Image (cartoon, rainbow, N blue to C red):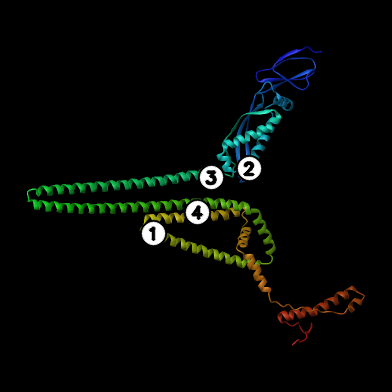
Amino acid sequence: MGIPRYIVAGPSEMLAITGNGIPEILLKKKHFLWPLQKCTTLDISPVNYSFQVQAMSAEKLPFYLPAVFTIGPKVLEEANYESLIKYAKLMSNSDKQSTHIQDLVKGVIEGETRVLAASMTMEQIFKGTKEFKQEVFDKVQLELNQFGLYIYNANVKQLVDVPGHEYFSYLGQKTQMEAANQAKIDVAEARMKGEIGAKLRDGETKQNAAKIDAETFVVSTQRQGEGKKEEVRVNTEVKIFQNQREAEVVEATTVLAKKKAGWSQTARLAEVEAEKAVAIREAELQMEVEKKKAFVETAKLKAELLTKATVEYDIKVQEANSELYKRQKEAEAALFESQKKAEAQRANADAELYARQQAANSELYAKQKEAEGVATIGKAQAIYLGSILKELNHNYPALRDYLMINNGIYQEIANTNAQAVQGMQPKISIWSGSNSAESEGGSGLKDVAGLYRMLPPLLETVHEQTGMQPPAWLATLPDHK
């Protein structure tokens, strides 16, 4: 029999006692350890676990989710150590820094994070980071409860792009370009308002000066007519009043015409700037749409189009080699001709653009943006063909077959072959010979007899197809006329 020992646990420790007189597990901070009892010290301090979980959103866009979780045994209520008992049963034999516990925690976090991310779009994850973090926290805590573990703190960092899928980088570039374009528009509007305000102030100054000059002239005329008779004074005042009214009418008409001209100019400038801004934005959005569309179409059609092109190529390559070469040359000629036409159209467009530049700056601005939009669409199509070629591992014959399938060239070849054999009336001749040679004893005589039986139909067929007669020493064909 051993001697009882008094054991005391540290501030961040707990004693787990089993053995004689204890039904299951007894948790204490201090205890008399009796014989036939065993005591294990549990470290209940939390530990930080750092992970970088790779997940995929509902749009199948991969991303990295850096996260730091502070996890430890659940010791929140002294009266209820149910969670700590689970921890003592399942995890007490493992060090908290060991790979066993780290793999367990990491597996739970990765599994719940991936399942949750797969049910949300990238926009929902990015905008609802707080809700996403809470969902991950709740689901992971639910799984860790069965091991007696508790999440004391969870810190989810910003989402990170996976190499080769720079979604957030492209999104940041898009935001920067939108802010820069909006700033240019605001500067142009402020400059326009400043110039219009300066013109309005100048016009008001000139109008006030003209009004003061007119009033000075009226006062001078009135003083000069004071010495005249009453009748002349009355007539003079009437004339002055009429002249004043006419001057006010002329002045009001002039002001109205000036304001109408200014308003018309302002409205026209605003319309032109709005149209150009819309054209610029449409070109930028079209470029983004073409890029995304090319990427999506490439990924979507990669397997089915490549497989379809390969199978159809293997089936029909033996049937249309000569026609394929002819079609290929025709396609190359058509492509060269279209390139030359495009170059001519581009030269004409440049000449027209130069002429419009001399005519009006606003129209030049619109045409430049229109040309940039056409170039952007061309670049997007070039990127689309380049991406298909890259997915085909730079297999130019496969790309050529893909383009020929889309353009219906194989169907035209099949139709041409069908039309070529249409109306043919082959003639079949049946010859039969006696079996007298079979009665011969030697096998060599059988072979010679078979050869001679084959010659008449062969010579007749050659004669019908080419008109050639066999030599007289070999055979003579009957005249069928």
Above or below residue 216? Residue 398 is below
* Residues marked 1 and 3 touching at CB (< 8 Å): no
Which mark is on residue 356?
1
Give SS at disc 4. helix
The residue indicated by pointer 3 is 170
Left or right placement of residue 127 versus residue 185 in this view: right
Circle 4 packing at 10 Å, graded few (<14), some (14-19), many (20+), is some
Earlier along the polypeptide chain: callout 1 or callout 3?
Answer: 3
Which mark is on residue 119?
2
The front one of 116 and 403 is 116
When asked about the image quadrant of residue 17, the answer is top right
Give SS at disc 1. helix
Which mark is on residue 253?
none
Disc number lying in front (2 or 3): 2
Query: Residue drawn at (54%, 63%), measured in percent from left and top?
Result: 335
The amino acid type, in three-letter code, at marker 4 is: Thr
